[in-house]
Amino acid sequence: MSSLRNAVSRRAHKERAQPNSRKKFGLLEKHKDYVERAQVFHKKEQTLQKLREKAAFRNPDEFYFRMIKTRNVDGVHKLESVANKYTPEELMLMKTQDMGYILQKLQSEKKKIEKLTAVLHSLDNQPSNRHVYYAEDREEAKEIQFLSLKSGMVPASDDVSNDIKRKTAASYRELEARRNRASQLEKLYMEMALQKELQKKGRKRKLREDEIVCPTSKAVYKWRAERKR
């Protein structure tokens, strides 16, 4: 019986819309909208209740590690500076690891660029299937053209399907994107290498614009020559 009851079509009862007299108040809130709004409200209410309980039962004499890492400024707790959290040796090691990762990605991009360039170069330099005919006059040229069309000989460019043309164009776009990425990685690697060198010990100074042989927009440093023992 249940299957027969479900087979009978029933009228879909819809919620009423906003009356014309209340159009100025916007859309009428439906039941599902009310349920969602109520759930959000109760969730916020429960969160506030838990925070109030936590603040009420908090033990002011209980030790926690942030006590020794903060200082009170005008009644506000502020964290101590973490600028000197790592030693110079640790910072140098992290710089070296980051440079190694960037160099690995740069080499990977260069290999992909070389492989993609070789594939596209082989496609562009494929031997042509055209056969050149020489005619003495226009009549002979027309006859040769008619015979070539009749035998099904078409230019090599027409033999390439639209799908292959689209894939070739996509490969060229990918090649250009990878070249841009490789250029950005190379600039980033050079910048990180400079920052690593600046962290090393030794007297150095920044050159003025009139002292730079090859003008550049980036800063140029010169280290004092030291005698190696």
Image (spheres, grey):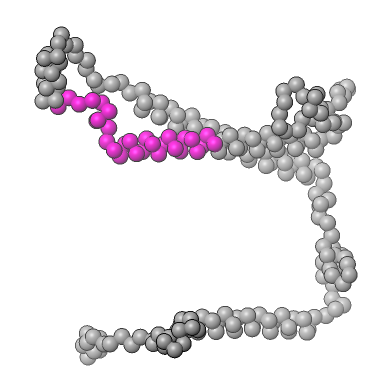
Residue found farthest to the top: 136
Whether residue 118 appears in this view of the structure is yes
Q: Residue at x 80, y 38 (%)?
A: 199
Q: Is residue 80 left or right of residue 116?
A: right
The secondary structure that dominates the magenta segment is helix
Q: Quadrant of residue 221?
A: top right
Q: Quadrant of residue 156?
A: top left
Which is nearer the eye, 61 or 196? 196
Q: Position of residue 27 (x, y in %)?
A: 46, 81
148, above or below 183, in the image: above
Q: Position of residue 148 (x, y in %)?
A: 14, 22
Q: Report if residue 211 lies within the magenta region.
A: no
Q: Report if residue 170 lies within the magenta region.
A: yes
Q: Quadrant of the N terminus?
A: bottom left
Q: Position of residue 115 (x, y in %)?
A: 46, 31
Q: Position of residue 195 (x, y in %)?
A: 75, 37
Which is nearer the eye, 175 or 106? 175
Q: Report the magenta residues as a range.
A: 151-180
